[in-house]
Image: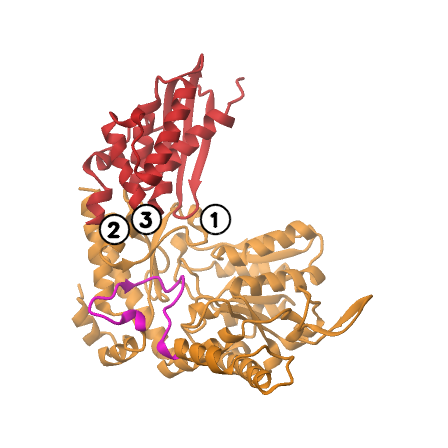
Chain colours: A red, B orange
């Protein structure tokens, strides 16, 4: 059934108890994202030091897929250089929209579970929202440091 | 608690199952053994055979452009188009057919008034009065008008949990003599039917022009513009068992006659020179270009069909189903139902603690129950009520108590799935 195909146990665990959920102290970058179709709202906060993602947190009032994706994303990008994380975001976008698994995400089993959304066109945005917001935070979300 | 069978026995508002079965047979959508439970009538209604067939017949055998050809087909097509206008006049009990302007739908009708009437009558410093329960389409056009003119928008607040409009506040705000009071007849989220007649009377006493958004009420409950006493009323055919692409703006003829056109082109001109043009009187003045002719034939058939079912029956049956669903949903763990606690119009909006509306709608869809999820084009209100996303089931005369049960069962299952 569709329900089981989409909501795999690993994703339900992440949506019920998302990792890195809540505000980040002293963020250097932040961005807000929303999905007008269904009302998902999400924000991402980053602390980037020497081009490295030292800390990544998100806050969501969103569906299970969006919340799980945010949780998995924070785990996948923390510690990466920004250009590595940006490349991973591109790989993830491809995974969510086509199901295609890029080499960089082959070993990320939980993240790959989100590849099922490509069979549900209306849910693709749920899975990509956290990554899009994350990319926007890096690109144009520098927080003025006081 | 009631089950579906007992409800049919007990609830006098509910139509007999024999009637409902007879109505259901008119909808190709419901053919087959296991049709989906379509509970998204607030977004758009299904189309009966009579409408589909009428449009097919008209497009295939009677079609030509209107108001221009000298040939017989054009004359007949014009008669059909103007016949639909007369049918709409009768349906809403307007005084004259010239009060009925065909638009693309409710949204275009509101935009027409905001541009044509608003541009002429709203000035810097004026107030436009809306309510917090308006659909975006009866909010954003006014916000834009306010931005263009320097007018201010005020909102009549909703009561706690969206249980109704704060009528005391409405009285106070109307006494401040806003230029226009634009408000919904039935809220598309809160299932509230506003006391439109009283509000229009109050507005008239204060010299305030009124516009009613009848998108959710037209073809769901009886709507009589003379009894209501409004200046404008807007609705969409596609929410009335009719086709997309056509809607009605009713305007009191004295007001329409004073309004300038808002779109320009063929159909709406009386005489054109290289240096300028003179415009025809309403309703033609507001119908630039070739109108939705085939759709007008569909609208005519839809109004005949709706009247044959009976507006009183439609109102009673769909509201009984919504009340039944609301009662059962309230009994589930963590469910919050918005709107009034007792009598409600044909829909129920609800949120489940710990389960996002998008997941609920997906889950329901998997069990062949079609509901709406999201903000329902009422973002400011849903934010105020603390539920940026919610689910909505909206009923019509072709829905059954068993379909409502399928919804409630799916929601109960979703709660167990997501909140084990």
Rendering coords of residue B72 (x, y %) = 59, 87
Secondary structure under tag 2 reads helix
Would you name the residue on which mark 1 appears?
B380
Q: Position of residue B201 (x, y in %)?
A: 57, 71
Q: Position of residue A127 (x, y in %)?
A: 34, 38
* Foreground label between 2 and 3: 2
* Secondary structure mainly formed by the magenta segment: loop
Residue B300: tell me if it is visible: no
**What residue is rendered at 21% in x and 39% in y?**
A8
User: Which residue in the protein does label 3 denote?
Assistant: B357
Chain ID, mark 1? B
In primary-sequence order, the first of circles 2 and 3 is 3
Q: Chain of mark 3?
A: B
Where is B25 relative to A106, above or below? below
State yes or no: discs 1 and 3 in contact (Cβ < 8 Å): no
Q: Say if labels 2 and 3 share a chain.
A: yes
Q: Could you classify mark 2 by the number of other residues whose Cα lies within 10 Å: few (under 14), some (14-19), or many (20 or more)?
A: many
Which image quarter: residue B316?
bottom left
Which mark, by number, is residue B116? none
Tell me where residue B375 appears, x and y as whole percent. Answer: 41, 50
Between B261 and B170, the one lying in front of the other is B261
Secondary structure, mark 1, is helix
Q: Tag 1 or tag 2, which sits nearer the N-term?
A: 2
> Which residue is depicted at the point 48% across and 82% down?
B61
Q: Which residues are magenta?
A: B28-50
């Amino acid at each position: 059934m569709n329900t089981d195909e989409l909501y795999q146990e690993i994703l339900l665990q992440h949506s019920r108890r998302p990792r890195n959920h809540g505000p980040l102290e002293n963020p250097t970058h932040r961005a807000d994202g929303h999905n007008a179709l269904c009302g998902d709202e999400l924000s991402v906060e980053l602390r980037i030091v020497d081009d490295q993602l030292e800390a990544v947190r998100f806050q969501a009032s969103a569906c299970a897929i969006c919340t799980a994706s945010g949780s998995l994303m924070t785990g996948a990008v923390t510690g990466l250089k920004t250009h590595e994380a940006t490349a991973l975001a591109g790989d993830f976008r491809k995974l969510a929209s086509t199901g295609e698994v890029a080499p960089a995400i082959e070993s990320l089993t939980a993240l790959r579970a989100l590849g099922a959304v490509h069979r549900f066109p209306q849910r693709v945005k749920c899975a990509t929202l956290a990554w899009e917001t994350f990319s926007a935070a890096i690109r144009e979300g520098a927080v003025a440091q006081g | 608690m009631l089950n579906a069978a007992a409800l049919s026995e007990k609830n006098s508002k509910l139509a007999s199952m024999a009637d409902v079965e007879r109505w259901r047979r008119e909808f190709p959508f419901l053919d087959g053994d296991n049709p989906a439970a379509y509970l998204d009538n607030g977004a758009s209604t299904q189309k009966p055979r009579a409408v589909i067939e009428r449009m097919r017949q008209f497009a295939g055998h009677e079609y030509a452009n209107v108001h221009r050809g000298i040939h017989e087909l054009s004359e007949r097509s014009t008669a059909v188009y103007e016949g639909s206008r007369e049918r709409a006049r009768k349906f809403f009990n307007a005084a004259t057919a010239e009060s009925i302007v065909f638009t693309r739908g409710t949204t275009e009708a509101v935009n027409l008034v905001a541009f044509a009437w608003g541009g002429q009558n709203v000035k810097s410093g004026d107030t436009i009065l809306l309510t917090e329960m308006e659909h975006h389409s009866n909010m954003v056009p006014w916000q834009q008008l306010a931005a263009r003119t320097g007018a201010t928008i005020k909102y009549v607040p909703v009561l706690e949990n969206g249980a109704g409009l704060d009528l005391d506040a409405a009285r106070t705000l109307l006494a401040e003599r806003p230029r226009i009071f634009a408000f919904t007849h039935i809220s598309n989220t809160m299932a509230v039917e506003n006391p439109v007649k009283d509000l229009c009377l109050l507005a008239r006493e204060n010299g305030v022009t009124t516009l009613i958004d009848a998108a959710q009420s037209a073809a769901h409950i009886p709507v009589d513009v003379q009894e209501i006493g409004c200046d404008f009323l807007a609705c969409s055919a596609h929410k009335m068992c009719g086709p997309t692409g056509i809607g009605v703006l009713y305007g009191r003829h004295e007001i329409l006659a004073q309004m300038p056109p808002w779109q320009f082109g063929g159909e709406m001109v009386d005489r054109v020179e290289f240096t300028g043009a003179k415009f025809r009187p309403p309703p033609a003045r507001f119908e630039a270009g070739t109108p939705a002719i085939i759709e007008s034939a569909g609208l005519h058939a839809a109004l005949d069909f709706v009247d044959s079912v009976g507006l009183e029956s439609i109102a009673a049956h769909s509201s009984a189903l919504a009340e039944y669903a609301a009662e059962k949903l309230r009994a589930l763990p963590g469910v919050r139902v918005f709107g009034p606690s007792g009598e409600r119009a044909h829909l129920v909006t609800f949120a489940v603690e710990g389960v996002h509306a998008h997941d609920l709608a997906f889950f329901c869809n998997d069990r062949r129950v079609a509901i709406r999820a999201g903000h329902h084009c009422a973002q400011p209100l849903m934010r105020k009520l603390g539920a940026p996303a919610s689910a909505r089931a909206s009923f019509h005369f072709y829905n059954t108590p068993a379909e409502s049960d399928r919804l409630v069962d799916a929601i109960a299952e979703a709660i167990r799935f997501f909140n084990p």
